[in-house]
Amino acid sequence: MTVERDFTNKVVLVTGGTKGIGYGIAECFLKAGATVLVCGRNAPLTLPGAEGRSADFFPADIRESADLDRLFTHIQERYGRLDVLVKNAGGTPYSLAASGSARFHESLISLNLTAPLLTALRANALMQDQDTGGVILFIGSVGAYSARPGSATYAAAKAGVLSLTKSLAVEWAPKVRVVCVSPGLVQTEQSHLHYGDDDGIAAVSATVPLGRMAQPSDIGEACLFMASSQAAYISGVDLLVHGGGERPAFLNAACVNNE
């Protein structure tokens, strides 16, 4: 069976689509023929591009309600529809929980949980009025499933996104499908901030069963599938894109049976 990759005449919004994973997702949808809008707080030096076309850009801080209002008014006036929302914008610096201030933790919850909900609410309002409905796709994280020292608040927010995915899929069906794609380790232009120099990145990559970190395009391809007609009966679920996960620590610690 061939996955349907034709998004011609479809309008796709990728939040945080000016860099990293979001940039790769935007390029995948452009290659599939979609009209792609990316948003971010600052205009990028280069926009995602493919097939001789590039994404449109709209300046917006998705944590601000006024910016979200302006963004979705622009979508309605410029394109007249929205077929796919990829709620990608998010992230965290490394910080042990006890080292962060209340304001720091609140800002992480705002970016990684509250903003996804508020963005999805606005997207759903547009999609419910469309004959063809739409797809809301959250970018989650494998951190939602395990302990994440140094990013505890971020991981908790991503766990909240998984709960949102399940509940909103029920509330907004049958017009709108709500799904999640959760990356594992992804190599981006900011990988050195998390893993160090090239040797550090190589060492971390070696811990992944498939032998490498994901590229942003790997996440983009997963998003294409989840947003496609081939996934028309998939809603309320999370797709893990982690290269096989993590090798259990006890296997490395044991002195037998550790191959």
Image (tube, grey):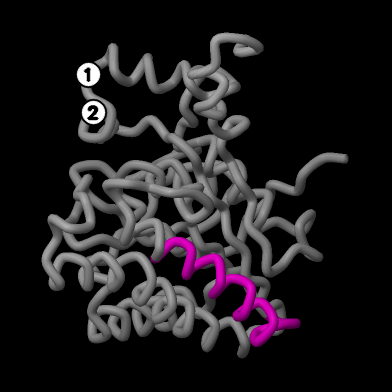
Q: Would you say the residues marked 2 and 1 are in contact, meaning their CB atoms lie under 8 Å apart?
A: yes
Q: Where is residue 104 in the image (x, y as percent from the top left)?
A: 15, 65
Identified by mark 2, the residue type is His
* Front one among 249 and 208: 249
- Tell me how far mark 2 sits from mark 1, CA to CA: 6 Å
Specify the segment rendered in magenta: 157-175
Residue position for label 2: 192
Q: Viewed as shown, does residue 138 lie left or right of 202?
A: right
Q: In the rendered view, would you say 197 is above or below 90?
A: above
Determine if the magenta segment contains residue 169: yes
Dot 1: few (<14), some (14–19), or many (≥20) neighbours within 10 Å?
Answer: few
Residue position for label 1: 197
Q: Earlier in the sequence, mark 2 or mark 1?
A: 2
Dot 2: few (<14), some (14–19), or many (≥20) neighbours within 10 Å?
Answer: few
* Quarter residue 114 falls in: bottom left
Q: Position of residue 169 (x, y in %)?
A: 66, 77
Q: Where is residue 251 in the image (x, y as percent from the top left)?
A: 57, 20
Q: In the rendered view, would you say 126 is above or below 199?
A: below
